[in-house]
Image (cartoon, helix red, strand yellow):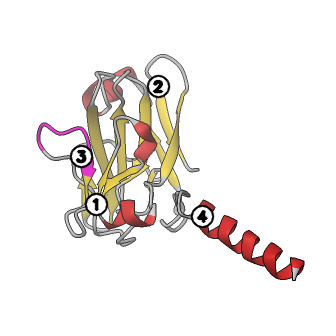
Amino acid sequence: MKTIHFILLLLVVTLWSACDSVDDNRIPYCEVRLTFPTVGDWNLYGVKGDAASYERYILAPGMRVPSAFPYTAMDRTGYGGLLLVADVLGDLHAYDLACPYEARPEIRLFIPEGELYAECPVCGSTYEVFSNGGMPRSGPAADRGYALQRYSVTSGGALNYRIVTR
C-alpha cells in the first residue's frame, strides 16, 4: 500500500513540475556563426546597442537578409535565421528566427512596429526578446512552454562581435 502511495505521489510531483518547465530545444541543431570583422561592418549592419533595437540575419538558398551584409563562406545563420537584439539595458542577445511552436525554418518571427516582443505570423505566439530571454508570453507556444532557441554573443574586441552556436 505504501508503494502505491509513493508511486502516486511521485507521479503527481512529476506532472506538477512539468507544467512549469520551458522547452527551448525544439529547433533542430544548426550551425551558427556570424562575424562583424570591422567597426564599419558593425556600424552598418549590427545592433547599435540602443535599448530595444534589433536586426534580422538570414542566409538561406535564394535569400540574404540584409542583402548587402558581407556574408562569408564560414557564416551560418541557424535554422530559420538570426534575430540579434539589444535588450532594455543595451545588452546583446541572439535568437533563432524560427518559431519553436511551428518548428519550420521558413516560418520566421517578426517584431511588430513599435512593440517590444516578437511574433509568429502563423500561430500568433509572442515572445519576450528585449527582456526575459526569449520566453513565450502568449499563444500556443506559451501554453506548451516553448521558448526561443538562444545563441551566444561574444566580443572579439571593441565592437567586433560574433554570434556562435549554443
Binning the other alpha carbons within 10 Å of mark 3 as few (below 14), some (14 to 19) or many (20 upward) gives some
- Front tag of 1 and 4: 4
The residue at which mark 2 appears reads as: 160
Q: CA distance from mark 4 to mark 3?
A: 44 Å
* Residue type highlighted by circle 3: Pro
Which range is magenta? 113-118
Task: Identify which residue is drawn at 68% across, 65% down.
Answer: 13
Q: Is residue 2 magenta?
A: no
Residue receiving disc 3: 66
Q: CA distance from mark 4 to mark 2?
A: 45 Å
Q: Secondary structure at mark 2?
A: loop
How far, Cα to Cα, is label 1 from label 2?
33 Å
Kindly identify the residue that appears in the image at 35 percent across and 42 percent down.
129
Sequence-wise, which precedes: disc 1 or disc 4?
Answer: 4
Q: Which residue is label 4 attached to?
A: 16
The amino acid beneath tag 1 is Ser
